[in-house]
Every structure is written in C-alpha cells, then in structure tokens.
Image (cartoon, helix red, strand yellow):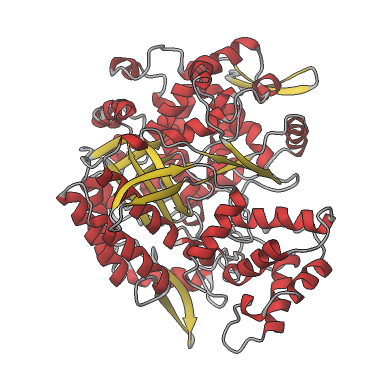
Amino acid sequence: MKKILPALALGPIMAISLQAAENKNFDYHADQFADIEVLRYEVPEFNSLSLQQKKMLYYLSQAAQAGRDIIWDQNCRYNLQLRPVLEAIYTGYDGPADSADWKAFQQYMKQVWFGNGIHHHYSNDKFTPAFSADFFKAQMAKLPADVFSTDEGQSIDELKALLEKVVFDPAFLAKKVSQDGSQDVILASATNLYDGNVTQAEVEDYYARLKDPADETPISYGLNARVAKVDGKVVEQVYHLNGLYGPAIAKIIYWLDMAKSVAENDAQREYITKLIDYYITGDLRTFDEYSILWAEDTKSDVDFVNGFIESYGDPLGMTGSWEAYVNFRNREASARTEAISGNAQWFEDHSPINPAYRKPEVKGVSAKVITASFLGGDAFPSTAIGINLPNANWIRAAHGSKSVTLENITEAYAMASIGNGFNEEFVIDAPTSKLLDDYLYITDMLHTDLHECLGHASGRLAPGVDQDALKENGATLEEARADLFALYYLPDAKLQEIGVLDNPDAYKAEYYKYMLNGLMTQLNRIELGKDVEEAHMRNRQLIAKWVLEHGKKDKVVELVKRGGKTYVKINDYKKMRDLLGQLLAEIQRIKSEGDYKAGNDLVQKYAVKIDPKLHKEVLDRYATLNIPPYRGFVNPVYNVITDDNGEITDITLDYTESYPDQMLRLSRDFSTLR
C-alpha cells in the first residue's frame, strides 16, 4: 500500500514546460478507446548505459513479462479461460468490418487487455459488452477446440456457456474488489485471491490465530497465498515454485538468475539470490530478508521490483498482486530526492502529529528519481508514478525504506496532455491557471517525492497494534496519511532551505490542483450514480471534503458558481495548511492506535458518497474536452543484437509496437499458466 497513482489525465496541471515540449519529437500516443488512452513512454539515456546494464534491464524485462498470467488469474479465476477465446475471435474475425458488434467487440478486447481481465483496473466494475450474446456465441462456434482451456471434468460446451455468463451476466462477478464494510467483502468480491467457499469471518479468524501480538518482526501474513476451504478446513495455497503459479514462477526465476549473472555489485547479487530463494520456497521470512537487503542497496543504478507486493487488489488488504518495475537511476533528478531523504529526521521531528507516534530515529530512508524501462503485472498497462517499499512496518522502522519517483512516466503523462483545454474549462481564473503553468510540474513532483520518501516512512504504530487493524479501509487511510504529510510540508521554508523549491508561494499550485481534483475532476472517472471505490480516489476525496467542511466557517475553501459552472476557490492557503495538519494528526492517531471505528467513520462520511448534481456537471463539462480519464502504457520492445557466436553485443529499444500487437505478442510468448 505504498505507491502513488496519477490523479487524472489533466492539462497543464500535469504538464511539463512548453519549452521542453518544443525539444521533443516523440509520439506519446498509441491508442484510445472507451475511457482509456494508451501512451508510450520514452527511456532517456538508455543508449548511454553500459552493455552490462543493458543486459540486466533486458533480463529483468523478461522476468517482468514471465509473470503476466499470474495477475490475470489473481484478478478473476476465469480470466485465463476467456482471454484466448477473445483473442482468437479478435485475430480470426472474417465478417464485415463495419459491423456494430465487431466494433464493440474490439473495444471490449482492448478494455480486457488493459484491465488484465474482465474488470476495470480502477473502478473494479466488470466491463459491460456492447456486442450481442448471439455475436459472441456465433464467433465461439467458429473456433477450434484447442482454443478452449477446460477445467478437469468440464466439456467445451459447458465452458462456452460459462464464458457467456462471465461476459454478459451483470450480476455474476460484478465487482473485482468490494470495500463495503457492511457486507462480507470476500464474498462480494470477484477476485481470485479466495475461493468461493471461504468467508471474511473465517479468513480473519484463520490469520488471527496465526498472529502473535508480541512478535515485533511479524511476517506479512497472507501476502503470497490464496486462501481456500478444503474438506471444511481453511488453508493457504502458497505461491511458489512447487505450489500455486509454479510454471510462471519457474520462468521468473530463470530470468532473475540471468540478471544475477550481470549484477552491478555483490549487494545486488545477494538480494537477487534471496528473491529467488523466496520464489522457490514461498517462505515469507525469506521475503523479509530479501526486502531488507533490497532496501539497504542504495548504490546500484539498475533496480527493480518483482513479486507479490501491493494489496490493493485484496478486499482485506493482505494478499499482494503480482507486479514488476524495471528501472535505472536518473542521477541529475535524484539530487532533489536525496536532499529530501537526507533531512528525513527533521521532517519527522516537526510533523504535526502526536509526538508519541513520531519515530524517534528515522532509519535508512533513501530516495531516488528513476527512469522506468519496463512495466509488468499489476503495474502494466496502468502504472504508479511513485513507489515506497518495503511495506512491512517493522522493516521500515528498523532498516528503512526506499522511495522512487518515475519521472519519465510523469513526463509522458504531461507531454501527452499539453493543450487539451483542461485549465480553460476547470480552473477558476487566469492568475490561478498561470500559477499552475509556472509551478505545478515541480510541486507535483515534490508531492510525489514527499509522499513516497517521507510520508509512508513516517510515524509508528503503538506497541501491540496489528498493522492490518484498519481492514478494508487500510489502503485509503494510508494513502491519505502519506498525501497529507506531503501537502503539509510543501509550503514549508525547509524546502527552500535545502534547495528543492525556489518560490515560497509555489505550493499553492499543488494545493489548488489537489482540491480541484479531490472535490471535482476525479469524478470523471466514476459512472453517474455510483460511489467512489478506488483507494487513491477515496483518499483524495476524503482530504478535500474534510478540508472543505472544516474550513467552512472561515471560507478557507469554497465551491463557487460562475456562469452556471462550479469552480474551486481557495481563499486562505495558510489556514488550509493548518487544516491539513489537523487531519494528518488524526489519521496518524487512527493508524497508530488501530482505531478501526474512527477510520471507518472518516471514510464513510467523506470518501465514498458523491453529490449527484456536481457529478453530472463534471461529466458534462469533461465530455466537451475528449480527455480520457484513464491512461496507461505500452512498453518499449527490447531488440537484442548478437554476434556470430550468439553473444550479445548491444541492446536497443523500439517504441513502434502497437497496443494490440503488444498484447497479442505477450499472450503468444508469455502464456505460462494455461
């Protein structure tokens, strides 16, 4: 639960300077469909790397692709049966090109690829097909038998009927992840992290009996396991080489071993070895050992994340979705994050939270700006713009954490957004728009830096508090805590003192963007009449609506009408900072004390419900702009150049592969579980 997602596909609110844009000749746009735009990202300085570094990035990119089937299966148990059928229809269709069913099918195929399955990557709702069931059945009837991957004892006709239900029945597997604490969130979720027989109460009881409240170094229970009920008994089906997902893990191990052979130093070689050991055994103590070694390696330029990491996809916030990031250090930009991390103790000591919940000694906080060179699993096609790991609280307290900001990903979002009309439609006036143009790129980057580098690394739990005590609200409240930490410190003179910001009023750009997004513009991502579901969106609305309400008396922030349209108006930026500090103190208390009720009350009051009139207005205004609310990426293709003896002499990147071609190639070359 330690990553930051991009807020929205905005205009100059996420834009890099126009001067930089004029020096670019890179095509960032790859595809657009439904509510999604697929972009390309550039990998600057790749050609300047050594051959050894290029080899390592290539091997790690292969490992990132080898686990693709894992996330598809984790997201829903029928995804890997449906995908080859959909792709066979997509590649073999021989009907009229102008058929409405065919056009709708193509869009559905692209949505499923983007979601790594049948559910939307952000809303968790199941995709609704606009093609007919008769079209689907007729196309399935044309396919050869070997396209259908039946379960034991299942006929092809039975599978066809099941797949028709999976695609067309809106009540079946309706939501991938439910966070509605008024019901059994496991039974209400379509995720394949639990079988269909185990209940929330049974899972919570199972892990409660395993946990020792006196253990000061607890493993991350449930991180790498599917929970099932076998012969009436709750059991873990662990992800490891000889267990669940073994064939995919074997391929991951192979490529990690190749990467180890070209490691930059002994420390890196040691943690790759430990990660391989973990994949072989599934032992979470070994994963903790790997995490410590990884966090302590601050010297390697090439770096990566590969494994079951973030638990957003689990309604109980325990099991990690499989993901992969491959990257290398951006040395010039890293000076910014190094200045921040080097002052971690100062920020902790001056935090507006209860001193009892501050860390008396901040250990091992390191941060860097990276250039992403490959994305995989749950980090692809949609990806974060910042990461802070490890997630285990005791490791962070005793050994520190490592934060990264993905600057080339942020730049790709920004460059693709220039001139899209967002500011003109949603920003209250020209002076505020100029403020955003002048300062939002740097303050948005600093927000990510502070969120990842210090926000997640700050604070501590009271003795004996279970890190999973906040249950389904844990992700929302943790992201709110990190955002609040970053927002509170953006105006601080300390940032000018350490040389990362040169204008004391620059923070106002980020404050305005944050309130605008939290109160209004992120609603473009939600279907009219529905609640806010995704943890990052809940976090942003929670903060913005809390500040709006608690600053109402002094009119700190207002929603005002001009020309029949609603705008955000901030009247007192300094008082807004004070309010952010108050909310940070309360959410830190909730986390430190494991106060589930207070946390749930906060989430339910501010984070979930939407004003339907304002929602409709936002949707209508966005409709005039043609700005997709969601964005993701295709990866560059690694071209390996060899000599007559088969030795690698160079590796280059190709950015021209289309979105459908990339997805079909991945299914062709990296289908490991079916």
Left or right, 641 with reference to 81: left
Left or right, 268 with reference to 178: left
- The location of residue 208, given as percent across then percent down, is 38, 68
Q: Nearer the viewer, residue 524 or 263?
A: 263
**Residue 204: in sight, yes or no?**
yes
Left or right, 192 with reference to 358: right
Give the quadrant of residue 585: top left
Residue shown at 69%/69% (left/top)? 166
Relative to 435, say whether 11 is above or below. below
**Residue 462: in sight, yes or no?**
no
Q: Farthest residue to the left: give it.
A: 266
Left or right, 343 with reference to 158: left
Residue shown at 27%/29% (left/top)? 338
- The location of residue 285, given as percent across then percent down, is 25, 64
Q: Nearer the viewer, residue 261 or 74?
A: 261
Q: Nearer the viewer, residue 52 or 371?
A: 52
- The location of residue 169, given as percent across then percent down, is 75, 67
- The location of residue 663, given as percent across then percent down, is 57, 56
Q: Farthest residue to the front: give it.
A: 644
Q: How many marks?
A: 0
